Amino acid sequence: MSNQPTVSDIFRRALEIRKSNPNGSYNDLKSQLVSEYSGKGYPATAYLTIPEYDNIAPEEDWTAGLPIVFRGIQNEDWNDIAHGIIISLEQVENYPKQSGREDDPAKEWRNRGKSIAEAEDKVLEKWMPEELMAVAKRNISN
């Protein structure tokens, strides 16, 4: 680590700590971050970002802690910086468990295709000429 970490560096470090101690509390993780980074230079606000986690949580969730990180940098307060990192980490960890994401295989009931298939068939029957329906059905069965 250089003397001036980036917010992304701190977030990745939080992920490493969490991976090595998955049952540790967020407070313990926050304390460890504060003790590791205290005395180092504060991150530059120009690089106020964390790695993207769009595949796990919506942007408004994985970036939730950035305003607090920003305030911590402005006030030169490692507690606020670590607190903001923990908020974002918590969102990244908890969103998939709480959201019932579309791509979660355990959430088969969220398959919207099943619920609209019947209505879709009715619309196609009503608006698509018989010849086109026959072509479409042949293409599907091939």
Image (tube, rainbow, N blue to C red):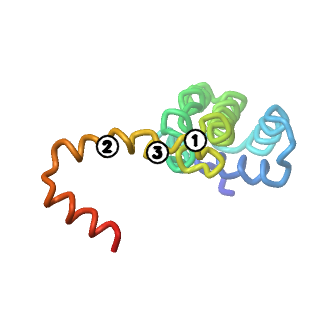
Q: Earlier in the sequence, mark 1 or mark 2?
A: 1
**Mark 3 secondary-structure assignment:** helix
Give the residue displayed 50% in from the left and 45% down from the top: 111
List x then y, in percent, for residue 10.
66, 47
Horizontal arrangement in the rendering, residue 6 relative to residue 115 (left or right)? right
Q: Which mark is residue 109?
A: 1
Q: Against 52, is 48 above or below?
A: above
**Mark 1 secondary-structure assignment:** helix
List x then y, in percent, for residue 136.
24, 62
Query: Tag 3: residue type?
Result: Lys
Q: Quadrant of the N terminus?
A: bottom right
**How far separated are the C-alphas under marks 1 and 2?**
18 Å
Query: Tag 1: residue type?
Result: Trp
Q: Earlier in the sequence, mark 2 or mark 3?
A: 3
Q: Which mark is residue 114?
A: 3
Give the residue displayed 62% in from the left and 49% down from the top: 5
List x then y, in percent, for residue 110.
54, 41
Give the residue displayed 55% in from the left and 46% down from the top: 50
Local crowd size for mark 3, using a 10 Å CA cut-off: few (<14), some (14–19), many (≥20): few
**Mark 2 secondary-structure assignment:** helix
Q: In this orientation, which residue lies closer to the viewer: 123 or 13?
A: 123
Query: Tag 2: residue type?
Result: Glu
Query: Hey, which quadrant is residue 61 in on the image?
Result: top right
Identify the residue position indicated by label 2 in the image. Answer: 120
**How far separated are the C-alphas under marks 2 and 3?**
10 Å
